[in-house]
Amino acid sequence: MTWTNLDNISQVEQCIEDSVVSPQLLFKHSTRCSISTMVLRRAEDQIDQQFVNPLFLDLIQFRNISNYIAEVTGVFHESPQAILLKNKKVVYHGSHGSIDWQIINKLCKE
């Protein structure tokens, strides 16, 4: 899986705009958390990348971007966390073991 690394707020703004054309998956990852690493591996095994643009946020390094994502999406920050955007709206979000990659794949194909 090829992730686009988020390292500035303008990328988040572009991601929201791009969600009109194709689904955008924001994945917030804590590099200090073994659960986050496990969830990341599941994402890489289960996400069908041909239908979604996956974006990766190292929230330890870029906590300000994580806070901005929470502010503009209205989704309370958690880690690990997946947020799926379509047409500039959050259509799915989940964290930890509650992230359902099959639902994300289904929503991306609709």
Image (tube, rainbow, N blue to C red):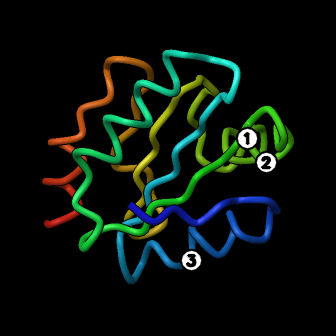
Identity of the residue drawn at 51% across and 78% down: 18
Judge by depth and name the residue closer to the eye, 35 or 55.
35
Question: For the C terminus, which image quadrant?
Answer: bottom left
Residues marked 1 and 2 touching at CB (< 8 Å): yes
Label 2 belongs to which residue?
Answer: 65
Q: Is residue 70 left or right of residue 80?
A: right
Judge by depth and name the residue closer to the eye, 24 or 40.
40
Does dot 2 land on a helix, a strand or a loop? Answer: helix
Identity of the residue drawn at 50% across and 27% down: 37
Gap in angstroms between the C-alphas marked 1 and 3 = 18 Å
Judge by depth and name the residue closer to the eye, 70 or 50.
50
Amino acid beneath label 3: Glu
Label 3 belongs to which residue?
Answer: 17
Amino acid beneath label 2: Ile
Identity of the residue drawn at 15% across and 42% down: 102
Label 1 belongs to which residue?
Answer: 66
